[in-house]
Image: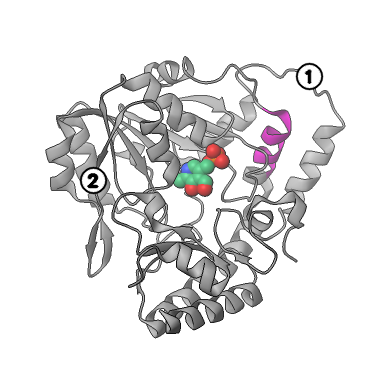
């Protein structure tokens, strides 16, 4: 069953005849142990929690992510991106990021009157790769890199060699790297290695339960890193308290969500493979994602997102939102039921024939 329309941004934004394969929610229900934990926590004390949040949860987050350092909770990962731009740069300065990129990265930079220093991913025969030379050329002009790993929208899970090379560049150019690793549990063949393993002294890792456990409506995130960086970030975070239901949900996810996550990854992987086979059949440019439930598709059609909405009645994320020069691309969210996915692919294929 897809989510009730009235409760869901994904399902309520477009007219009813449109299939929504856009914003990054999964259509699947939340894991049972998480629902139970939220219910039980709701029976308890719902006043202010300690400012620093639940100690057990902090320990679990560090252990599961394989990270060390200070933990600051925040109401969502995007909040952390905005706070990082404010904490580590001044208006008018440049902020580095790899494009195409999840649009709030660009908004966090631009809305705070900084400049985007775009370092486009290289498209190689093997898939997307960091352009390390390009990064090195731009790095002198910035103090901050907003990194995304696994990468949204390409689904790239960066390899250890790339991460080590990126760390060397960050050291040479005195960069702070904010690494959004929200999708880290959602990887397929190859596991996720945190950037902080290569660059512990300069990395702030942003994490949360929102994507892997489908909890975006209970906004919650954490920044993990060396104390001075976490404290600098904290000064720019909103003065809110950690949400007690979100903390209970995250704790249950880390303690008891493994089976659900495994089943969900199997479903996602089948969909990923289906999208990849379909893209090949219909002649779209595509590298199957190594992580995330997002497929980045290159079409021959200008403004492809608007075209597919009109002609296929399928809502995808238009590529132009992810950086300049990507209007022929779309991002497709395949975290749905096979029937929904098949219908969407059929409609997209029909529209492509008209293009
Ligand atoms: C890479 C990335 N970062 C952040 C977010 C949003 O995080 P939050 O809802 O915790 O602000 C998303 C949502 O899709 C995402 O893909």
- CB-based contact (under 8 Å), mark 2 and mark 1: no
Q: Which residue is mark 1?
A: 47
Residue 104 screen position, x and y as percent:
45, 40
In what quadrant of the picture does the C terminus appear?
Answer: bottom left
Range covered by the magenta-colored residues: 243-252
| Disc on res. 7 | none
Q: Relative to 195, is 17 on the left or the right?
A: right
Say if 331 sits above or below 225 in the image: below
Q: In the rendering, at what x and y percent does residue 48 appear?
A: 73, 17
Q: Secondary structure at mark 1?
A: loop
Give the camera-side residue of 294 and 350. Answer: 350
Question: Which residue is more in the foreground, 181 or 100?
Answer: 100
Say which residue appears at 67% left-offset and 33% top-offset. 247
Q: Is residue 51 above or below residue 15?
A: above
In which quadrant of the rendered view does residue 313 lie? bottom right
The verdict on label 2 being within 8 Å of ligand 1 is no
Q: Position of residue 343 (x, y in %)?
A: 61, 78
Q: CA distance from mark 2 to mark 1?
A: 45 Å
Number of residues whose C-alpha sits closer than 10 Å to that of mark 2, classed few (under 14), some (14–19) or many (20 or more): many
The residue that appears at 28% across and 55% down in the rendered structure is: 325
Q: Residue at x 35, y 68 (%)?
A: 287
**What residue is rendered at 20% in x and 26% in y?**
174
161 versus 90 height, above or below: below
Quickly name the residue at label 2: 119
Task: Report x, y in % for residue 80.
Answer: 47, 30
Q: Main secondary structure of the magenta part?
A: helix
Q: Residues within 10 Å of mark 1 (few under 14, many from 20)?
A: few
Q: Is mark 1 within 8 Å of ligand 1?
A: no
Q: Is residue 213 visible?
A: yes
Q: Secondary structure at mark 2?
A: loop
């Amino acid at each position: 069953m897809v989510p009730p329309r009235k409760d869901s941004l994904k399902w309520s934004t477009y007219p009813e005849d449109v299939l929504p394969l856009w914003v990054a929610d999964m259509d699947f229900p939340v894991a049972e142990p998480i629902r139970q934990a939220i219910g039980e926590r709701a029976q308890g004390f719902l006043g202010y929690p300690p400012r620093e949040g639940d100690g057990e949860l902090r320990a679990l987050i560090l252990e599961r992510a394989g990270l060390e350092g200070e933990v600051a909770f925040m109401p969502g990962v995007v909040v952390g991106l905005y706070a990082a731009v404010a904490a580590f740069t001044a208006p008018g300065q440049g902020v580095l990021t790899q494009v195409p990129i999840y649009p709030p990265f660009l908004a966090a930079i631009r809305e705070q009157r900084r400049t985007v220093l775009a370092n486009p991913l290289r498209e190689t025969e093997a898939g997307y790769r960091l352009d390390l030379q390009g990064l090195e050329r731009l790095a002198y002009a910035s103090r901050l890199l907003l990194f995304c790993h696994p990468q949204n929208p390409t689904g790239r899970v960066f390899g250890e060699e790339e991460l080590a090379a990126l760390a060397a560049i960050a050291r040479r150019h005195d960069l702070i790297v904010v690494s959004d690793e929200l999708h880290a549990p959602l990887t397929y063949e190859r596991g996720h290695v945190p950037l902080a393993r290569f660059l512990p002294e300069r990395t702030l890792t942003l994490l949360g339960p929102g994507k892997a456990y489908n909890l975006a409506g209970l906004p919650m995130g954490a920044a993990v890193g060396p104390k001075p960086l976490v404290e600098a970030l904290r000064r720019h975070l909103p003065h809110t308290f950690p949400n007690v239901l979100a903390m209970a949900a995250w704790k249950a996810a880390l303690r008891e969500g493994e089976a659900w996550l495994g089943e969900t990854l199997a479903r996602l992987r089948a969909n990923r493979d289906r999208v990849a086979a379909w893209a090949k059949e219909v002649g779209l440019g595509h590298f199957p994602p190594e992580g995330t439930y997002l497929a980045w598709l290159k079409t021959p059609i200008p403004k492809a997102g608007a075209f597919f909405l009109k002609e296929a009645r399928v809502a995808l994320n238009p590529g132009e939102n992810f950086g300049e020069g990507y209007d022929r691309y779309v991002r497709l969210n395949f975290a749905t039921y096979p029937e929904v996915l098949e219908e969407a692919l059929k409609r997209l294929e029909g529209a492509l024939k008209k293009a």
